[in-house]
Image (tube, rainbow, N blue to C red):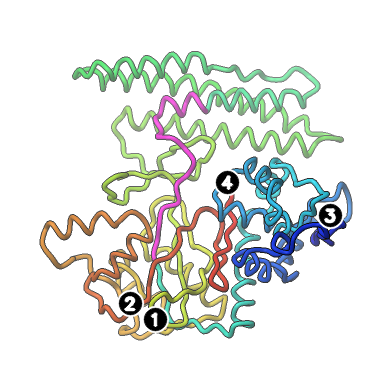
Amino acid sequence: MLRLLAGQVESLWDEVLPASVRELPGDLARLDRVLADPALLAPIAEAWEVGSRGQGRPSIPMESFVRLMVVKQRTGWGYETLVREVSDSLHLRRFCLIGIDRPVPDGSTVRKLVRRLGAGVVEEMTRRVIGKAMRETRFRARAARVDSTVVEADIRYPSDAVLALQGARALAREGRKVARLLTREAVRVRDRSRALGRTVRAISRTLSRRTGEALEQVLVLNQQAGRIAARSAREARRLATQARASARGRGARRKLRAAAALERLADCCLKLVDQIDRRVRGSKITDRLVSISDPDARPIRKGKLGKPTEFGYVAQLCELTENTRPGARGLLLPAAHAIGNPAENRLLTQTAAELDRAGLRPKELVADGGFLPELTREAFPDLNPEQIQIASRHEPGSRRTRRRRARYRTGIEGRISHLKRGYGLRRSRLKGHTGMRTWTGWAILAYDLDTLAIRAH
């Protein structure tokens, strides 16, 4: 059952607390005023299943859930740390609308709600915050800054054999779950992680020899790992077919969901097998898989000195400000994102559509040298060419100066700082552009000199 409001927070115990403890700090007080609007919870009610809104066990109050996620993003804590710290802090309890005599929701409960709601709910909440800011503060977007950054996935450096080991282990685990749902004898998905583990260790020993034949031997071992993973994937597909055929009567939906999840995992492993075969044949791999648990992550090369290759996604941020004075702050639109490493202008159409949806018409647009002038003007036909400022890739100065400036290219803040340092643009145009915050998962909400964000893992 859906619960939106948290109800009364104060109790008799609050009367014995000092006034300084009962009052929220300045930053939390400003966020509390923003989040107090009940209209911000409407996207959650719309996304909740109609049949379960008034039935079942009551959920935790969505007011408290949203505030818990705001605290999580501001501090960078994990779910368990978040629950522990909120339990021990009177200020955080009051901000999250959790009374002193009430328990804090369990970390697994918060994590499941994050997966259930999804990023679309937060994007709609972002739009409502922007509308609230425009109504209450009479915000007028005069300038827009657009840049892209890499959102790294939570994965370690991948290799084909290690991915095959992870895939076979996951197939065996999910296969056991599906087999428990079937009444008759089910197809067995063998756990071949021991054989794949021996293959991974053999690859490590081969690479340590550093001989000319090591590369060929590694390719042979990778091909062997691919064949082992393919056998597990074929068994998983047969088990999924058996589970789908037996989905009758009570528990049919559960069987169908389990079979669909097992088939998705098997398809992911078969894609890895094809990727290994392409590497052995020397064919080009255009859509490389780098994680079994996060199949949408891709390798992205941005040319950074300390980390030339990153694994994750590309997100494009657009910040709107009222003026170009120093320290100008504004609103961050829901980030545009895509799988892989798309060009800057490919995401710009999504950013332009988000501006149209919010009814915003900035008079100036500032972007870096990764944007092509012609495509940028096509995405914003209402702006004159003089109002679209695109920085040049060719920097003035000596070779030593260019090397020193290249150290700043470590993300979106570094790129905006690079814009401020020259880049061929007029200094007066970029004097007030101090850089944007990095998008870290869900969309970002910005309002009244503070940034609200909700992060999903």
Q: Are marks 2 and 4 in contact (CB under 8 Å)?
A: no
Q: Nearer the viewer, mark 3 or mark 1?
A: 3
Q: Of the residues under marks 2 and 3, which one precedes in the sequence? A: 3
Q: Are marks 1 and 2 in contact (CB under 8 Å)?
A: yes
CA gap between label 3 and label 4 equals: 28 Å
- Amino acid carrying mark 3 in the image: Trp
- Amino acid carrying mark 4 in the image: Trp
Is 329 colored magenta in this rendering?
no
- Amino acid carrying mark 1 in the image: Arg
Q: Taking 266 as reference, is 38 left or right?
A: right
Residue at 52%, 18% (x, y): give it. Answer: 193
Residue at 49%, 45% (x, y): give it. Answer: 296
- Quadrant assignment, res 32: bottom right
- Amino acid carrying mark 2 in the image: Lys
Q: Say if 217 sits above or below 319 in the image.
A: above
Q: Nearer the viewer, mark 2 or mark 3?
A: 3
Q: Residue 437: give x, y in percent of width and height.
A: 45, 62
According to the picture, the residue beneath numbered tag 2 turns out to be 431
> Residue 325: which numbered mark, if any?
1
According to the picture, the residue beneath numbered tag 3 turns out to be 13
Give the magenta-colored segment's residue range. Answer: 147-166
CA gap between label 4 and label 1 equals: 34 Å
